[in-house]
Amino acid sequence: MTQTRQTFAAGSRLFSPARLGRLDLPNRLVMAPLTRNRAGADGVPGELMATHYAQRATAGLIIAEATTPNAVGQTYPHIPGIHTAAQAAGWQRVTRAVRDAGGRMFLQLQHGGRIGHPDTSGHVPLAPSAVPLPEPLHTSAGLQDPVTPRAMTEEDIRSTIADFAHAARNAVAAGFEGVEVHAANGLLLHQFLAPNTNLRTDAWGGSVEGRIRFAVEVVRAVAEAVGPERVGVRISPGVEVNGIVEPDLEELYPALLAALAELEPVYLHVEYADQERPGFAMLRRAWPGTLIANPKLSREEAAADGGAARGERLLAEGADLVALGRAFIANPDFVERARTGAPLNELRPEFLMHVHGAEGYNDYPALVPALV
């Protein structure tokens, strides 16, 4: 089935070119990072993933899915990694396919922190403090109760920062234009930011300055490894997914953005961006560089146009680029459909995560079959 929508005006900024650091983007529509569990059991991307991303190469920028910088950081089964030679070689096949199709890619680097399980990674998860996830999670043995993570030592913290830098170098060597450091969605960096998951009393916790330190040091190390023009950062202020609570976000995020801005990453990616919330305007004022806005869409908005109308409003309110997820999942040629008002494919949510294979992944039809 398909959903129909109205055609955008020819002058819509969504389809105008943009500059991102040293990259020229043909449009302002970004394919958001999307966990899809389609890598091998060893975290190696295969031809399935190469085909998937090449099909969607008309996006102004693709931010590839959350990818682990080390073994202990793995969240769920069949999540890709970028810390072994085989994983890097697999990603190189993906970036080559996307480049051959005319696209550009960043890779999101994600450490799960307490979101992990020994049955999946082979390791007890590490986190700022020994505070378990408050809900079951998917593991290699099925849905299970979480384990209590081990609180990170100073050595753990330093080695994890180094692992992020090494993963960034691997990503660039594998053909990515850059990397996005994931500091959102209740993952490790976000766990350091939030006072309910960071109970530390040392220099990595307590005050706002202490809680932002890990995220800042990760971004610093990654920027030193590959250059700030190749580094983006994703945040999700006030998003309480995975048990995160941020009672002081109005103090926390201005401090974080001020510290990050000194490192000059090429973009800030804000999840659940909403121009009607005062927080979005605050973030836009506080961030001096390129801002990617990722809106939270109602079911009606997603069905109507995949979020394009909301994206156009966000551009008018100060965003530079707009990241959309489900629209790109169901429509490999979403940019063309949005530009022309062509019908959208209906999303099949049962194939979004924790399944494998091409069904609901590479079999969504394009208006014109892609040559991949």
Image (cartoon, grey):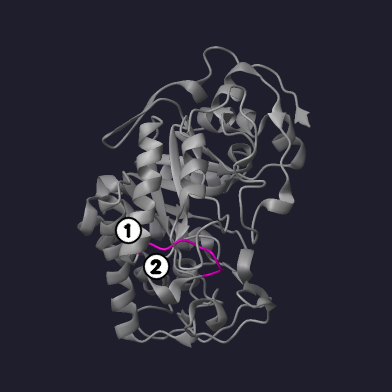
Horizontal side of residue 30 vs 221, given as left or right: right
Amino acid type at mark 2: Ile
Q: Quadrant of residue 244?
A: bottom right
Residue 242 is at least partly visible in this image? yes
State which tag comes first along the sequence, 2 or 1. Answer: 2
Question: How far apart are the two marked residues, 2 and 1, measured between alpha carbons?
Answer: 9 Å
Q: Amino acid at mark 1?
A: Ala
Magenta portion: prevailing SS class: loop
Q: Residues within 10 Å of mark 1 (few under 14, many from 20)?
A: some
Tell whether 63 sits left or right of 240.
left
Q: Say whether residue 16 is magenta.
A: no
- Residue 288 falls left or right of residue 344: left
Mark 1 highlights which residue? 259
How many badges with numbers are in the image?
2
Q: Quadrant of the N terminus?
A: top right
Vertical arrangement, residue 314 with respect to residue 361, above or below: above
Say which element carries label 2: helix
Do tag 2 and tag 1 residues touch (Cβ < 8 Å)?
Answer: yes
* Residue 39 at x, y percent in the picture: 50, 59
**Percent position of residue 12, x then y:** 53, 18
Tell me the residue at 62%/81% (across/down).
Answer: 146
Q: Which residue is mark 2?
A: 212
Q: Position of residue 151 (x, y in %)?
A: 45, 86
Is 62 rendered above or below residue 132? above
Q: Is residue 81 magenta?
A: yes
Mark number, residue 101: none
Q: Which residues are magenta?
A: 75-82
Category of crowding for the residue at label 2, using alpha-carbon neighbours closer than 10 angstroms: few (below 14), some (14–19), many (at least 20): many
Q: Is residue 319 visible?
A: no
Q: Nearer the viewer, residue 112 or 36?
A: 36
Residue at 52 percent across and 13 percent down: it is 11
- When asked about the image quadrant of residue 18, the answer is top left
